[in-house]
Amino acid sequence: MRKVLKKSACLLTAVALSATMVALPAAAEEAHAAEKPHMKKIGVKFDLKKNKTVKSKEKFAAVGNKTMKITVKNYKTTKLKNGKKKTTFTIVYAEPFKPSKRQVHKMANYYLGVFKGGYYFSVVDYSTGLSIANDSDLSKELGVTVKYSDWKYSGTKKYKDGDGCWVRYPSKASIKVSITYPADYKGACLGVGANNYVYQEGSPCGKVNQAHFDGKRPFGKTYMYKRGKTNSHWMRIK
């Protein structure tokens, strides 16, 4: 669900109430806290709406964070005859940043060999924060199926620095997603975002994030959250 860009030599290419308060005993407080849904507890922004563009910061190595625009389009929910619902949509990521020659040179010679943070989406369970995509154990238990297309890229451009180095990446990417779930299940959440840090595939950071997409680690324990607590946007799918 994430795209990473790597380099070879200096060439780089592109291959988310009561007013009266009563104190609870310590044990009761712990139990009460444990009952709080994971996605509410970690305080992410539930401000994602269909056809509304949100912003997320994507890290460009040696240059800094740049604003990416993300929009959920063609959102549609239908009721199926088997007692389930199906929600479909397309996520569009727009990266307007166009580097100067000096910035291209810095990015192309970044020592990690990766110059761009990348972007992601995740479909999780509201209570646990665990991914319910990729046929995880939880998705099977809940009766949820998530399908998604290959990434589609457009506006790919090669930026040069004047010294023979260059970087190349698309200005737009999109992916189609389909979620099928029991009609009475209200826990599905969609999150979108970019990474405001750079890391290589296979690194400890990458392994932690992949564990989330595999349904083994809640979103609040990923680097996507720890290094970007307010950098993702979420919506409930009902």
Image (spheres, rainbow, N blue to C red):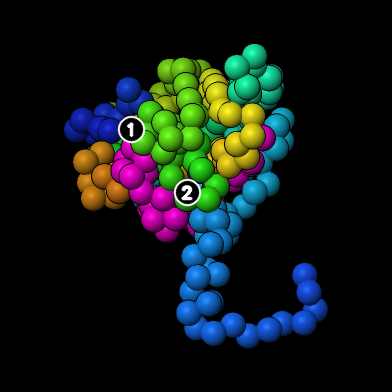
Secondary structure of the residue carrying numbered label 2: loop
Residue corresponding to mark 2: 129
- Mark 2 / mark 1, whichever is N-terminal: 1
Q: Position of residue 133 (x, y in %)?
A: 43, 32
User: Does residue 176 lie above or below 161 as drawn?
Assistant: above
Q: Residue at x 55, y 24 (%)?
A: 180
Q: Residue at x 77, y 82 (%)?
A: 20
Front-lying residue, 180 or 202: 180
Tell me, yes or no, if residue 188 can be seen here. yes
User: Seen from this angle, which residue lies furthest left?
Assistant: 9
Kindly identify which numbered label has been placed on residue 5. 1
Left or right of 167 in this view: 120: right
User: Does residue 232 lie above or below 162 as drawn?
Assistant: below
Q: Position of residue 83 (x, y in %)?
A: 63, 22
Front-lying residue, 147 or 59: 147
Mark nearest the camera among 2 and 1 is: 2
Q: Position of residue 121 (x, y in %)?
A: 49, 36
Q: CA distance from mark 2 to mark 1?
A: 27 Å
Q: Position of residue 149 (x, y in %)?
A: 46, 17
Secondary structure of the residue carrying numbered label 1: loop
Identify the magenta region. Answer: 209-238
Q: Amino acid at mark 1?
A: Leu
Left or right of 157 in this view: 11: left
Q: Residue at x 32, y 26 (%)?
A: 13
